[in-house]
Image (cartoon, rainbow, N blue to C red):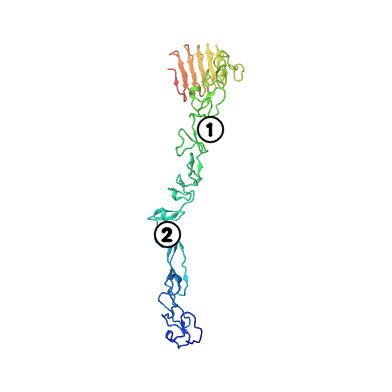
Amino acid sequence: MCCESGCDTVCVSCIKANTDADDGKCAAVKADTDPDKECEDQAEATCGAAKDKGCNGDAKAPGCVLWDNKTVCVAASCAAGQQTPASLCDGKGVCVKAASTACTPYKCKSNDVVCLADCKAGKDADCVDGNYCEADKCVAKKDNGKACADPKECKSGSCVDLFCCDTACAGKCEACGLQGSEGKCSFVAKGQDPADECPGGACNGAGACALDGAQKCVADKDCLSGFCPPQDLVCCDKVCSGTCEACLKSKTGGTDGVCGYVTKDTEPDGDCKGQGKCWAQGVCLACGETPLAPGGKPCPKECTSCDQGFRICTIKCQQGDCTNKALACPAGYDCDVQCTGLVSCKGATITCPDSYDCKVACSGSQACQGTKIACSTLGTCNLTCDQGQDHCKDAQLTCGTNACTATCNDPKEPKPAASCGNSCQCTQCQ
């Protein structure tokens, strides 16, 4: 057929039977026909020629009928936490891509094309990383320092002492809830043990346990005080390394764990190097040696004499010698005042040094009448009134916290006045 033109594009023809135009005239092929089989079916994904539709019959723009704008060219999906609705053809041969939406904090619904809306079924497994399931809803994990009940609630994965913590904080004497340091694993303060990790002691402030006073130890680091005297191997309140010092009750007569001087006339740790015995206040004294004042000086002038074998200051007052006088034993000595004879210590004031024993014996008429005796705070106190006329009439005895006794050997004698204070034992004349 002779034609007015090449007529070689899709859906055109020069044959009248195919068009509504005369033979020889190039025109659009009739709608819904495809005489030359040019519009073979194309897949929906291409948005190209629609199935069994043929040509469009458009005189101005002849071509194949394309998939319309309701045709799905890419199916809806949900993968890797991204929900994407179906993409549609635009009716002009183009597939218009649909926008994706993140499912966060949820994951995609299993075997479906949508996001989950809760975590009732899968719990934590239904939540994306950085979230966990709480009350059937996915919520963001918490920063360190926030309150928690389960490790899954925390970004760090550690819930310690009811706080999200920067580490597992599983070491001894470590905590993550210390005031001002919530969320940070820290050493428990020295002397504290909130988790009861240290039997017989407490935390040392450096991530370890240490022992309380009087507990058995091997080295200084074992003790909260930092002191483990090698001669005693118990935790002590101080260094306790001086001459004749110890930290055991069996050596000092005091309290285990409290440093003190050992009992007089003993040498439990060899401090005197076999040349004598411990005396008092860190002084050694050889057997048979006359006691001297600290530093090796002669007995103090207040003393009439210093007895051998004991660190005792003896003051002897005979008839009228010490009437109305002030008598004071020197520091570092037990005090032994002997009032013998008429008015020997009448009206006198006798003072004993702190921590030392005080002994006053009255023998003779009015020997201690009106005498005032002030014993030491910690030493023992003893007043003895022998038989005779008014030996201890109007005498006053003031005690400390140790044993305090007043002994009257004449039942007819007027009794001294004893102020017992807090003494652990107080016996007045009856």
Visible in this render: residue 174?
Answer: yes
Q: Using the image, tell me which numbered label, if any, was put on residue 108.
A: 2
Assign a secondary structure to mark 1: helix
At label 2, which amino acid type do we have?
Cys
Position of residue 181 relative to residue 217, above or below, is below
Residue type indicated by callout 1: Lys
Residue extending farthest to the front is 1
Q: How crowded is mark 1: few (under 14 residues within 10 Å), some or many (20 or more)?
A: some
Residue drawn at x 44%, y 87% is: 16
Residue at the far bottom: name it. Answer: 22
Find residue 195 and name its label: none
Tell which circle, 2 or 1, labels the residue nearer the N-terminal end: 2
Give the residue number, with chain letter if any, for mark 1. 221
Residue 183 percent location from the top left of the image:
49, 47
Q: Which of marks 2 and 1 is in front?
A: 2
Tag 2's secondary structure? loop
Rendering coords of residue 238 (x, y %): 54, 29
In the image, residue 262 lies at what x, y percent? 52, 22
Q: Where is residue 424 in the image (x, y as percent from the top left)?
A: 45, 23
Q: In the rendered image, which quarter contains the C terminus? A: top left
Q: Is residue 115 above or below residue 244?
A: below
> In the picture shown, does residue 100 fall above or below 342?
below
| Residue nearest the observer in this picture, 322 or 405 | 405
Within-10-Å neighbours for mark 2: few <14, some 14–19, many 20+: many
CA distance for labels 2 and 1 = 58 Å
The residue lying at 51 percent from left, 16 percent from top is: 360
Report if residue 323 is visible in the image.
Answer: no
Q: Do the CB atoms of the residues marked 2 and 1 lie less than 8 Å apart?
A: no
